[in-house]
Structure formats: C-alpha cells, structure tokens
Amino acid sequence: MIKLDAKNRTNSADMGYTEIKDPLNKVGNFLPEKTKIKAGNLNFYYGKTHTLKDINLNIYEKKVTAIIGPSGCGKSTFIRLLNRMNDFVADSRAEGEILIDENNIFGKTADPVEIRKRVGMVFQKPNPFPKSIFDNIAYGLEINGAKDRFYIEEKVVNSLKKSALFEEIRHRLRDNALGLSGGQQQRLCIARCIAIEPEIILFDEPCASLDPISTAKIEELILELKKDYTIVIVTHNMQQALRVSDYTAFFLMGELIEYNTTKKIFENPSDRRTEDYITGRFG
Amino acid sequence: MNKRFKQALGFFIVKTLVLAALTVLAAILIFLFAKGAGIISWDFLAKPPENSMTEGGIFPAILGTFYLVFFSVLFSLPPGLACAIYLNEYSPKGWFSGIIRISINNLAGVPSIVFGLFGLAVFVKQLGFGVSILSGSLTLSIVILPLIISSTQEALMTVPQSIREASMALGATKWTTIRRIVLPQATPSILTAVILSIGRAAGETAPILFTAAVFYTRELPKSLFSEVMALPYHIYALITEGTHPETQIKIAYGSSLVLLFMVLFLSMAAIRIRQRHRSHYDKIRR
Amino acid sequence: MYRHFEDELEDIKNTILKMSAYVEEEIENSIKALKNLDPELAKKTIEKDREIDRIEISVDEKCAEIILRHHPLAGDLRFVLAALKLNNDLERIADLAVDIAERTLEISGRPPLKELVKIPQLAGLVKLMLKNSVEAFTNRDYELAKKVILSDARVNSIRDEIMAELTENFIKKDPAAAERALALILISRHLERIGDHCVNIAEDIIYMVSAKIVKHHHEEF
C-alpha cells in the first residue's frame, strides 16, 4: 500500500523552509532547532483524488507547529499520516517519506503500532472510552505491557496532574469518564496520551467542540507540554495558532503554500494566498 | 380536512392498530391460561408422564428443552461472534464478505424443516451422533446462527469509530482494540441477540423433530448423546398422536403455558445480565 | 466577497488623508503668517488645531475598535499599527505649526528683523516631506518613504545654518534684536521637528509595506 521511492529522498539541508528576514532577530535560516519530523516529497492519494501534493516540511523538536488552511486542504490528512492513522483509510495510498528521528515510518521494518506509541494523538471530538477515568488511562499502559498495580496507579495520577485535571477529579477516579464535561474529557484524552510517554503529540482541532474557558485551559496545557514534547496542531482558529505555536504551515488544496515562524506568517506572509486566507479575504 | 383533523385521525389509526396487536397478545395469554392453568401443579412440573401420556407431568420435556436451548446457544455464539467480527472489523467491504453476507441472509430465510432434514442427514446419520441432544442442539444452532451474526454485526456497528481510533492511536493492535474496547461496548446488544435466539431455539419444533426429540422416555438424559423429550415436540405429539385426546389436550395447553414461561424466564435471566452490564458501561451516558 | 471590514479600513485611511490635508494647510498658514507678520492668520492657525485634535481622537477610536472587533492580521495589522502611529505624528506636526504661529504672534507687532530667506526654504522642504510621506501612505510607496527619510539630513543642516547665522548676526551683536532672533531660531527648530515627525511617518509606512523595522538604523539602506 505504501510505496517508498528511493529517488524521492531529499537532502535535509534547506527543505521546505522559507528564509526568515527579521532585522531585530538576525537568525536567518540557521535557527538552532533540531528537526524531529521530516516529510519528504510526501504525496497522498484517496481513490483518484490527489489530496497531498509533494509536501516537504521539517517539524522541530519541542516546538509547537500549527497547520492551518481551509477545510479540505489536506491538513488533517497530513497529521494523520504522521502516526499512520491513514492506514485504515480504504483505497488510499501514500508516497514519499516521513522521517521521525531519521527513520522512515513507511519503511519496510517500521511497525505502525510502535509508531503510534511514539506519536500520540488527540482528536477533534473528545473520545474517552466508556470506562472509568482511571481505566481510561490505565488501558494505554496495560496494552503496552504494564502489569504492576502501583506503577500504573502512579502513572495515572502523574499524567492527570500533568494535564491539569487531577485536582478537579481526584475523588472521582472510579467514575465513568463520560460523565465529565467536554473540556475535562479532552484533558483526559491528553492525559491518556501522555501516560504512555510519546515523543510527539498530534492535536487534530482539539478545541473545535469546546467552550472558551476549556479552550484556554487546553491551550495553556499545550504550552506546558511543549517543554517535553514535539507538538503538531491542526486548527481553524488563527488566534489559537498565534497563541500556541512557534511555527505555522499554511496548506491549500493539498499543497504546502508557506511555512515559517508563526510571527512571520501572521505579520508578513510571503505568499499572497496565505495573506488572503489569514486576513479573511479568501475565496 | 384540516391539519389538526388529519393529525387526530393519524393518531387514532396508530392507537387502534396498537390496541389490536395488544388484544391478540392478551387473547393468546388468556386463552392459554383458561385452557391450561387448571392442570398446572407441582407434580405436573416435577414428574414424568404416566399412563400413556394421560397423567403425570412434563418434567423430562422441560429439562430437554432447557438442554437444547443451552447447548444451541453455546454452539452458535462463538462462530456467530467470530463471523460478525470478521465481517464488521476486518473485512467490511469486498466480494468475499459480500458473499458471506448474502449467504447469511439466505440462511435466515430457509424453512426450519429443511434444517431438520439437514440435521438428520449430517449429525444423526453421517456423523453418527444419533437422535440426541448433541444433534438437536447443533441443528438448532444453525437455525439461530444468522440471527446472532446479524444482531452482533449491528451491535458492533453502533460502537463509535472514534473510540476505536482512540485505542489504535495509543498503540493498541486491532485485536486488542476489539477485545478490550469494542466487544465490551457491544455486549448489551449481543446479549439482546442471545435473548432473541433463546426464544427461537426453545420454540422450534421442526429442527428437533428428527434429530433430538422423542415422544416418550421415562429416563432423564444422561449425556449429550441421549435422546430427549422437548416441550414443543411434546405439545405437537400430544395433539396429533395418542389414544386419549380429551385428557391429552389439557396437558398440551398446560405444556404450552410452561413453554411460554420458560422462554420468559430464560430471557429475564439474559436481560438481568444485560442490565448489569449496561449500568456498568453507560451509567452516565447522555 | 464583500466585507464591512474593508470599509472600516478604508474609513481610517480616508480620515487620515483628510487630517493630513488639514495639517499641510496648518504649516502653509503658519509660514504665511510668519512671512507677512499677520496676527489674524496666526490666530486662525491656532484655532484650526482644535479640529485636528478632534480628528486625532476619532482615528484612535476607530483603530481601537477595529483591533477589538476584527483582530486584524498580516497586512491589515500592519496598516492599523501604522495608522495609529501616523495619527500621533500628524497631530504633533499640527502642534508644531501652532507653536510657529505663537512665535509669530510674539514678534508680529514689531519691525521685521530681516528678509526671511532660509526659513521659507526650510518650510518648503518639510512641507514637501509631509506631502511625500502622505503620498507614500496613499500609494504604499516604499521608495518615496525612503526618500523622505533620506532628506532629513538636509533639513538638519539648513536648521544649523539658520541658527548659526542668527546667533552670529543678531544675538551676539544686538541685544535689542535678541528676542526676535530667538523666536526665529525656535521656529527653525519647530520646522526641523516637523521633519523628524515626517521621518517617523515614513518609517511606519516602510513597516506597513514591508514589515521591516528601519527605526534607529537608517544605514540599512
């Protein structure tokens, strides 16, 4: 299903990165960032539709990278490739490569289950399991081989603390997770994700169904998580991209139009289409 | 005709039809009670028939039906679940699963006497199980298999895709996800399927006619290879055969009432299990 | 797609253009009053400043509202930021014209010290700078804004010449003329300050057009 084309491998030197011109911060193209994920000539086909076209993009370690663009531009498809969730999409095909720490996740020896342990995902709609709050988090630990009860308990409490949920629900750990509010459910999903200690967390419009206060809490959490994780977030909300991200990529009709620091993209985008989109003059 | 009148008329028609259905149901119950309640006693339930079916009880038939239902559900549930999981989780599209689906639907439409003949040919004769609980419950299990497969499939479909994705995204394999997330969620609906199949299995006469049931045996079944009495067949036999129709008909109505309550009792047990499961899983849902 | 947001941006732009027309007129009138020692025109100039102050407040309000409501981004954001700063600089320029008019009033009852040559020349130069920077704003003209910034050196040197000349010829020689000479020195300084504000405006326009911050390091170009 996944075709790997050796000829399509690209040199890592200056891929997909627009030069940064900022007189007060003359870092230019030589930002001291470490590349964590590197998409090279990435193409995705759904049936006969070409939904991602030659994407070249470097995502930096312990930074927040926002993916913006109109609906159907391929941004969700892109992040779902990063943990191979698109494997389940029938009649689809990916070409090119995605390197995580230099290893191609489409390679012959790559195991999608292992990749998903390293690349966690938080979905658009909070999707806790219909189990207790405790079991929601313990599940991920158990399927990854944890057996010791004390270890699991400690992990559950720690990840709830990290996702700023513990204080609110400390006496309700055995209650059904579906009884939590939407925002709490989403933070539980984040706790569930960080419990298994991934290196990368993908957020697919995590606040789309939340109220402003829950949204603010999730955003605050993302900024906190940035210290330990590489984060990629798809969002429709420009203000959110501005508040949480360090880098922003703009997708349009399956193409990566522009990728730069968030400040550059929102203050002075290089491409007319980016400017039209973020200033609301699109279409 | 104005709108309000139309609405009143619509409600009236619906209510009348519901009432008609309930009346038929009530009529059956009243009829059965009126004709059969008189004969029911402790001896009737606990003793074997005596004096060429004109006296005594129906205990062997009750026990026989219970065994047949229990084993037919036991035999059909694992392959039924496996088939539904395969169809819904592993191969939702494609020509092969299409063929399986069509076959299952056709299986559901086959008249039960055909199953009886099949059971006779394969289980009784070919495999040499003889007229026995084993042959009978295997035959019944084929009868209820389509019901279990299609109900289970529907149950699996109601489990939201989003929680499957959540599990996969945590690094669970497909099988782990099915075992630990999907099946527990679908269990209440699967139990509903089991309840329906209990009723079906308990009531079928034709499939056990040649495979398990006998008109009369004083001995209680000793093993899976024993032949048994069964309530539906017992009722059938009382009405169509024998020498003392007047006394036999009373026993037949009594047996019908017992069969009805037996199905009810078995279903209640399954409903209890389902509810306990539900309260565990969706206590707070919506 | 038609958007009210565009109308609001256009409204800010038009208000600023109207304001800059008033400000140019203020400079014009204050210099004319000075040349003719015309107290009436000087008073009229001082009066007119109130109108400009009102416009300044309205532009501030419009900008605050557009930021509040629309969260402008990219080019729109840079436009609103530039408009806010332009507004401030234009108002300061009008205040300086008022200062010139006040100096004129102080000396208007007395005989002229000398034929004014370099002050009108300086005034002409800063008026051109203002005109150019407003034009650069209207046309989003990077080059013209750059020209405004570069002409500031000439303004400074003319002011220095005026100050040296007045100090040498009058203040040092004739105590009776010192007061009038000082007024003229102050006027030359006011004009030079107007030039500085024009440079500020030009810098903001460069930011608006290109997102470059050229403030305090003109050696960039």
Image (cartoon, coloured by chain):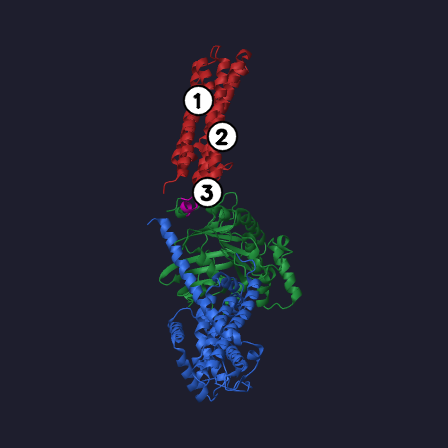
Chain colours: A green, B blue, C red
Q: Residue furthest front?
A: B246
In this rendering, position of residue B165 left or right of residue A169? left
Which residue is labeled 3 in the image? C73
Mark 3 belongs to chain = C
Name the amino acid, label 2.
Answer: Asn
Mark 2 belongs to chain = C
Measured Cα–Cα span from mark 2 to mark 1 = 16 Å
Q: Which residues are magenta?
A: A274-280
Task: Place residue B239 in its image quadrant.
Answer: bottom left
Name the amino acid, label 1.
Answer: Glu
Q: Are marks 3 and 1 in contact (CB under 8 Å)?
A: no
- Mark 3: secondary structure: loop
Name the amino acid, label 3.
Answer: Leu
- Mark 2: secondary structure: helix
Picture coordinates of residue A277, whole percent (x, y): 41, 47
Query: As rendered, which of A228 and C30 lies closer to the eye?
Result: A228
Please report the residue visible at 44 percent of the width from the left and 72 percent of the height from the top: B147
* A279 inside magenta stretch: yes
Asked if badge 3 and badge 1 are on a common chain, one would say yes
Mark closer to the observer (3, 1) = 3
